[in-house]
Amino acid sequence: MALWMEKGSEPITESEKADLEAIAALKESAAFEFKEKGNQYVKMGKKHYSDAIDCYTRAIDQKALSDSDTSILFSNRAHVNLLLGNLRRALIDSQEALKLCPSNIKAIYRASKASLSLNMLAEATEYCLKGLQLDPNNEDLKKLDRQIGLKISEKEMHEAQVSKAAAETKELVSAIEYRGLKIGKAMYRELTGLRKPVLDKSNILHWPVVLLYAEVMSSDFIEDFCETDMFSQSNIFAEDQPLSWDVENNYRREFIELYYEAGSGLCLSKEKLHRCLLEGTAASHSEDVGDEEKDAVEDYKQQTGSPKWIEVNDRKTLHDVLKEPNFIIPGIPVFYVVSKQSSFYSKFKAGKWAPPSV
């Protein structure tokens, strides 16, 4: 007789029934044997996890066990997939196990754990609560519940930080746009890092400012230069502070002049400016910002020619200088300090010196 009968057909004779029962018993025995081999492979360690999965799969394929026993096989395979980091497969196996036996605690736990690892927090919570309803004293589930709660709190905190950063950046872009300021590609990032202007509660901008002593390419930094302050009030023109490299004392207050480079680079679009100002915040998208910055670097290099230096009137406020139509702020303001007493001064004024390429 044929050992495989069409679906829906019934054995006709007692002999056929006996043969089918014998086949079913063999398949059931084989399934349990594969299951035990799979368990042994798991105990043998990571090198044998693939063998364990193969054994559980072959046991499932026998289609000879009860729903409860088959549920255990799917749950066991889910466990190994979790150990291997096959999170999606582990979740699918756990779900298959629960279809066959909704009260399978281990399958519930593994479904919750896989969901958590996949950052599916709502699903992880749902599975975990279901398991605790069935087994309130299950320590593994209680521990997992705490982990899910912590992950949810971290996610909510991150979302709040992202929302805050996005809102602050939007306000900052609006403030810059309202003032008619032009922002270009950031220069001297090795000196400035990711510093950017700050808008205070009174809607006043505070800028970090780079000072470059062009003659020696030494730098100084002003962390907080309020846009309403005059240059004469800043540290630039403060009482003499000897510079270690200024052996001839050329850079005393009465000798120094401050310049910015006019029309250097291209003005960033509002969208590019927004992305750049988001960089380094919780709402940043570094890969997008990086691409935009690369384009900006190329634009800047293409525009660089003989520099045109504009002297800064120290009686003006920072805002007055920054809003000059020919001033494209290179990320944050950069001013060049030169001395009228230095031999370098004539070279600088003649436009024979240019800042190094960035």
Image (tube, helix red, strand yellow):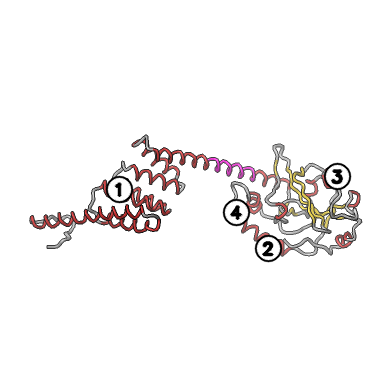
Q: Mark 4 or mark 1, which is nearer the start of the sequence?
A: 1
Mark 3 sits on what residue?
238
The reply to whether the C-beta atoms of the residues labelled 3 and 4 are less than 8 Å apart is no
**Separation (CA) of disc 4 from disc 2:** 18 Å
SS under mark 4: helix
Mark 2 sits on what residue?
298
The reply to whether the C-beta atoms of the residues labelled 1 and 4 are less than 8 Å apart is no
**Separation (CA) of disc 2 from disc 1:** 61 Å
- Residue density around tag 1, few if under 14, some if 14–19, many if 20 or more, within 10 Å: many
**Which marked residue is nearer to the observer: mark 4 or mark 2?**
4
* Residue reaching furthest to the front: 44
SS under mark 3: loop
Identify the magenta region: 156-169
Q: Mark 1 or mark 2, which is nearer the start of the sequence?
A: 1
Q: Is residue 218 toward the left or the right of residue 189 in the image?
A: right
Q: Amino acid at mark 4?
A: Ser
Mark 1 sits on what residue?
72
On the image, the x and y values in percent for residue 183 come to 71, 53
**Separation (CA) of disc 1 from disc 3:** 79 Å
Q: Mark 3 or mark 1, which is nearer the start of the sequence?
A: 1
- Residue density around tag 3, few if under 14, some if 14–19, many if 20 or more, within 10 Å: few
Mark 4 sits on what residue?
286
**Which marked residue is nearer to the observer: mark 3 or mark 4?**
3
The reply to whether the C-beta atoms of the residues labelled 2 and 1 are less than 8 Å apart is no
Nearest the eye: 199 or 150: 150
Question: Which residue lies at the image location 34% right of the left edge and 52% below the top edge?
Answer: 77
Q: Mark 2 or mark 4, which is nearer the start of the sequence?
A: 4
